[in-house]
């Protein structure tokens, strides 16, 4: 009957919603977390994608430049 098919489909759907590979996904590193945090903050201030890319590049490579380099 129609009700039996619906119940069977619901029963099958409940069993297919398990995430088998969830434990195999490695956690993200702190560097990556900080990078996305900076991206979120910066994107709110400067919506242009090229500007965002430049700011994030400079922040990630801060050890290679200083104020004297920019002047």
Image: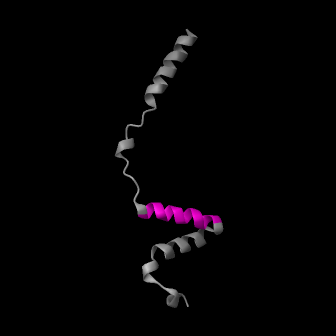
Quadrant where the N terminus sits is: top right
Q: Which residues are magenta?
A: 31-44
Give the answer, above or below, for where 7 lies relative to 32: above
In the image, 59 versus 49, the foreground residue is: 59
Residue at 48% x, 26% y: name it: 13
**Does residue 47 appear anywhere in the picture?**
no
Residue 43: x percent and y percent?
61, 65
Give the answer, above or below, for where 61 lies relative to 11: below
Quadrant where the C terminus sits is: bottom right
**Does residue 17 appear anywhere in the picture?**
yes
Give the answer, above or below, for where 44 lies relative to 71: above
Residue at 36% x, 43% y: name it: 23
Residue 9 appears left or right of 49: left
Would you say the magenta stretch is mainly helix, strand or loop? helix
Indicate the quadrant where residue 16 lies.
top left
Q: Is residue 36 magenta?
A: yes
Residue 58 appears left or right of 29: right
Residue at 47% x, 20% y: name it: 11
Residue 51: x percent and y percent?
60, 72
Q: Is residue 66 magenta?
A: no
Residue 12: x percent and y percent?
46, 23
Residue at 51% x, 91% y: name it: 68
């Amino acid at each position: 009957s129609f009700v039996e098919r619906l119940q069977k489909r619901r029963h099958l759907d409940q069993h297919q919603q398990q995430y088998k590979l969830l434990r195999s996904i490695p956690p993200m590193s702190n560097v990556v977390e900080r990078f996305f945090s900076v991206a979120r903050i910066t994107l709110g201030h400067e919506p242009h994608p090229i500007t965002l890319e430049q700011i994030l590049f400079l922040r990630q490579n801060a050890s290679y430049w200083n104020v004297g380099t920019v002047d």
